[in-house]
Amino acid sequence: MDADLLSLKYDLLEEGLDLERFHAAEDKQWVRDRVFSIIGRHLSSIRIDSLIVEKRKTHPKFREQNKFYPAMLGYLLRHVFNQVHGERYNQIVVKTDQLPVNKKRQAFEKAIKTTLVEMLPRTACYRVVHHESRSSISLQVADYCNWAVYKKWTNDDYRSYELIKEGIKSEFDIFRTGDTHYY
């Protein structure tokens, strides 16, 4: 998929559009159509898991950003590792977009590492890396998939969602019952 998206990037450059990266919320619809077409051809090689969170339903003690995002990320990682039997893997690399504030990055990293230590066998190695999304096709694909799920949940807009739904393995509304003490 990376090669196909890189090729598209060069095609767009030849067509007069200079994109540094693919970003679903910023790209024009005709660009999104082409990116989703490529993602759609590769759905069998990716796994899409989404955690749906309504911030207003979050328990007050988790509403601060330095607690909220790591807690939700930790929950998502636990869910995914339970689904894919994380114990089978001897090396895990978690890649996130570069966070601008070092304090937030440290909180995220701590949450990720805590979850990985809990979920993985002692023999498994893991690394947490933070890359600018513009430098990583996989982060750009994640952005597109997350955007499609977001549009479905917030605007009842299924256009992009329908293009990737075959690759969606889970979509979990963590506070669906209204219970703010879920975790």
Image: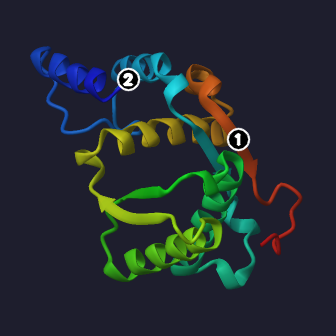
Query: Mark 1 or 2, which is nearer the eye?
Result: 1
Q: Can you identify the residue that label 2 sits on? A: 35
- Residue occupying image coordinates x 75% and y 77%: 59
What amino acid is labelled 1 in the image?
Ser
Q: Position of residue 79 (x, y in %)?
A: 69, 55
Rendered position, 160 above or below 132: above
Rendered position, 5 above or below 113: above
- Residue occupying image coordinates x 39% and y 65%: 127
Q: Examine the rendering and report whether any part of residue 52 can be seen.
A: no
Q: Position of residue 125 (x, y in %)?
A: 45, 65
Tag 1 and tag 2, C-beta contact below 8 Å = no
Q: In which quarter of the view is residue 6 placed?
A: top left
Mark 1 residue element: strand
Q: Which of disc 2 and disc 1 is earlier in sequence?
A: 2
Q: Position of residue 74 (x, y in %)?
A: 61, 67
Q: Can you identify the residue that label 1 sits on? A: 170
Quadrant the N terminus occupies: top left
Nearer to the camera, 160 or 37: 37
- Residue occupying image coordinates x 40% and y 58%: 96
